[in-house]
Image (cartoon, grey):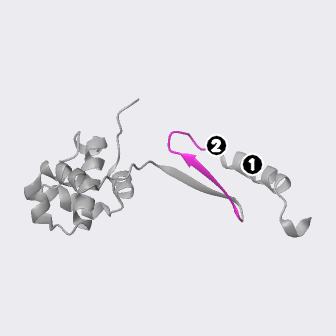
Amino acid sequence: MTAANYSIVELAQLGGVSRRTVRYYIQEHLLPPPLGVGRGRHYGSEHLARLLAVKAMQEQGMTLEEIREAGSAGKRQLSAAGVRPVERSRWTRIDVLPGIELHVSGDYRLPAPIKLAELGEWCRQAFRRQEEE
């Protein structure tokens, strides 16, 4: 299994926050700074885990100052309280036809649009609306 490398956009999406919030959390020492330098900056699974932990502690009513003071003890507080961060992964949702969706894991490369159109046509033929029968 390869190590996760997220852009700031991907990290923010997976964490359910904005890019601005990610930058603010780094500035406030709630998240470690990104790995790499310049355009090669990226975030790893530890960044995502910490971001989710910060969000969970906020949901428990902790202030950012309390979260910062808790530091690494935050994960222990979460597990003691029975709160576990939700595992998140990247998925793409494609509307093949009205009422028919295709969900594709981020581990897969999406096919060309012409292939998706062919899939849509196949679905149109294979899935008939109840009204048509």
Query: Which image quarter holds the N terminus?
Result: top left
User: What residue do we see at 23% from left, 66% from top?
Assistant: 60
Confirm or deny contact between disc 2 and disc 1 (CB under 8 A): yes
- On the image, the x and y values in percent for residue 77 come to 18, 54
- Residue 44 visible from this viewpoint: no
Q: Magenta stretch?
A: 99-111
Q: Which residue is mark 2?
A: 111
Q: Is residue 27 left or right of residue 111?
A: left
Mark 1 crowd level (few <14, some 14–19, many ≥20, 10 Å Cα): some
Query: Which image quarter holds the C terminus?
Result: bottom right
Q: Secondary structure at mark 2?
A: loop
Q: Magenta segment: does it hold 26?
A: no
Q: Secondary structure at mark 1?
A: helix
Mark 2 crowd level (few <14, some 14–19, many ≥20, 10 Å Cα): few
Q: Is residue 89 left or right of residue 12?
A: right
Looking at the rendered structure, the kind of residue marked 2 is Pro
Residue 119, numbered circle: 1
> Looking at the image, is 53 positioned above or below residue 17?
above
The residue most toward the left is 69
Looking at the rendered structure, the kind of residue marked 1 is Leu
